[in-house]
Amino acid sequence: MVLSRSGYLIREGFRSIKTHSFMSFASVTIIMACLIIMGSVTLLSFNIDALIKNLEDQNEVVAFVEDAVTEEADARALQPALEAVENVQSVEFISREEAMEKFMSKYDDSLREGIDPSVFRHRFVVHLTDIAQMKETQAEMENIVGIAKVKAHLEYASAFVTIRNIVSVVSLVLTVILVFVSVFIMSNTIKLTTFGRREEIAIMKMVGATNSFIRLPFVVEGLVLGLLGGGLAFLAEWGLYGLITSRVMGTVSNSILTESIFTLIPFKTLALPVLIVFMSISVLVGVFGGVNAIRNYLKV
């Protein structure tokens, strides 16, 4: 008996979708549009954050060894002290000879005459975990005995941190706004569908139908529309993301930027989280919209 009644109510939900096909199409389209916009903003945020992280990795801090430390072994002995500094991710030693070779590779033969390794200092190339703490890390490394000075691009670090914070805040605000917009539009769209069935609902109430009995077909309707909208939105986002990334990387490959610096996250890396989020939001929006849409009509 219970299974039979449940089957009837579920069939009623599907029948309602077919009967009100235009409004069902509008609901699915609205869910798709909101999810695509929200997903695009979020994916853009992820890629900008990844780009900034990549630029952070390229932003090196150079710690120069004092001139008095001439022996390579003595200079290398400073590496553990640098690695022990908080916020230091990695340390690479560069000898005087290696520094001279890098310098020579940048200039022609006329500028190389009379230069020997003693002109250069032993040094360490340091990568930081968080460039927001670059100034404090620089001061701590300069306090190490044997380190003469630390060259750090503080202005670039500040710019990167500012951009990262702005992108994070904007992305969060837009995501929250779009979720509320999706719920509001979906609920009102289903309300338009139920408006034409208000007399049917009133008759069912008067003959003794329970609220749950009346509500279930609308919940099923919202659930199906939500799943359909979320699935189609995911496929559309996949195609749109692939199209945009191919165009962007094609442009970048012809510019001064290199793929080692400017890279985009492959969609397959984000596909599962995007699918889960899309389906979860669409189901919640659909079910909530279906329940909320008939709330007033149940007060008979």
Image (spheres, rainbow, N blue to C red):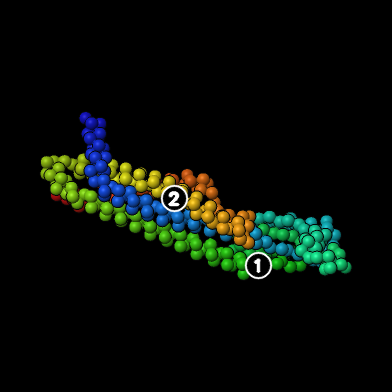
State whether residue 56 is above or below residue 222. below
Task: Give the residue at mark 2.
Answer: 237
Task: Give the residue at mark 1.
Answer: 153
Q: Nearer the N terminus, badge 2 or badge 1?
A: 1
Q: Position of residue 227 (x, y in %)?
A: 35, 44
The answer to whether residue 118 of the structure is visible from this angle is: no
Between 128 and 42, the residue placed more toward the observer is 42
State whether residue 48 is above or below residue 238. below
Q: Position of residue 200 (x, y in %)?
A: 15, 45
User: Residue visible at 18% across and 50% down?
Assistant: 196
- Determine whether the residue tagged by mark 1 lies in a helix, strand or loop: loop
Figure quadrant of residue 220 = top left
Q: Amino acid at mark 1?
A: His
- Tell me how many marks there are: 2
Picture disc at residue 70: none
Q: Is residue 291 left or right of residue 147?
A: left
Between 70 and 84, the residue placed more toward the observer is 70
Figure quadrant of residue 276 = top left
User: Residue visible at 83% across and 59% down?
Assistant: 97
